[in-house]
Image: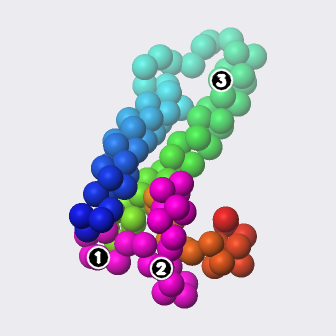
C-alpha cells in the first residue's frame, strides 16, 4: 500500500472536497439557505437551476462512490488490478484517473476510457 500512498492521499483530499460540494449543492437545490421567490416566473427559473444543481450533485455522488471503491481496494491490497480481466492497471492511468478500476483495454471495450 505504501506504493500508492500519494494516490491514497489524493483520493482522500478529493473525497473531502466532493463531500463539501455535494452538501452545498444539495442545500442549494432544497433551498435550505433561502426560500423560493414568490414570483412564478422566478420560481420557474429557480426550478431549472435546481435541475442543474441536482445533476451536478448526482455526478459528485457517482465520483464519491468510485473514490470509496478505490480506497476499499487500496485497503484490501487489490488496488491497481483491473476488475474485468485481472491485469495490472498502468501507473500512468492511475495517476490520471486514480479511481479507475479497469485497464485501458477493458475501458475501451466498455467505452469508458
Which residue matches tag 3? Answer: 46
Crowd band around label 3 with a 10 angstrom C-alpha radius: few (<14), some (14–19), many (20+): some
Which residue matches tag 2? Answer: 88
Of callouts 2 and 3, the N-terminal one: 3
In depth, the one of 91 and 13 nearer the eye is 91
User: Residue reaching furthest bottom?
Assistant: 85
Crowd band around label 1 with a 10 angstrom C-alpha radius: few (<14), some (14–19), many (20+): few
Residue for point 35% across, 78% down: 78
Asked if residue 47 shows in the view, the reply is no
Residue for point 51% across, 84% down: 87
Which residue matches tag 1? Answer: 77
In depth, the one of 72 and 77 nearer the eye is 77
Q: Which span is picked out in magenta? A: 74-97
Residue for point 71% across, 78% down: 109
User: Is residue 93 part of the magenta span, yes or no?
Assistant: yes
- For the stretch drawn in magenta, what is the main secondary structure? loop
Q: Nearer the viewer, mark 2 or mark 1?
A: 2
User: Is residue 94 part of the magenta span, yes or no?
Assistant: yes
- Is disc 2 in contact with disc 1, using a CB cutoff of under 8 Å? no
Q: Quick one: SS at disc 1? A: loop
- Residue 43: x and y, percent? 67, 20
Instruction: State the CA–CA distance, disc 2 to disc 1.
Output: 13 Å
Amino acid at each position: 500500500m505504501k506504493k500508492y500512498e500519494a494516490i491514497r492521499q489524493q483520493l482522500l483530499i478529493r473525497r473531502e472536497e466532493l463531500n463539501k460540494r455535494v452538501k452545498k449543492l444539495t442545500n442549494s437545490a432544497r433551498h435550505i439557505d433561502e426560500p423560493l421567490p414568490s414570483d412564478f416566473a422566478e420560481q420557474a427559473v429557480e426550478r431549472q437551476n435546481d435541475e442543474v444543481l441536482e445533476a451536478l450533485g448526482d455526478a459528485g455522488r457517482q465520483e464519491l462512490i468510485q473514490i470509496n471503491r478505490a480506497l476499499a481496494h487500496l485497503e484490501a491490497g487489490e488496488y491497481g488490478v483491473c476488475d474485468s480481466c485481472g491485469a495490472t492497471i498502468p501507473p500512468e492511468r492511475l495517476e490520471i484517473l486514480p479511481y479507475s478500476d479497469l485497464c485501458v483495454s477493458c475501458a475501451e471495450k466498455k467505452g469508458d476510457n
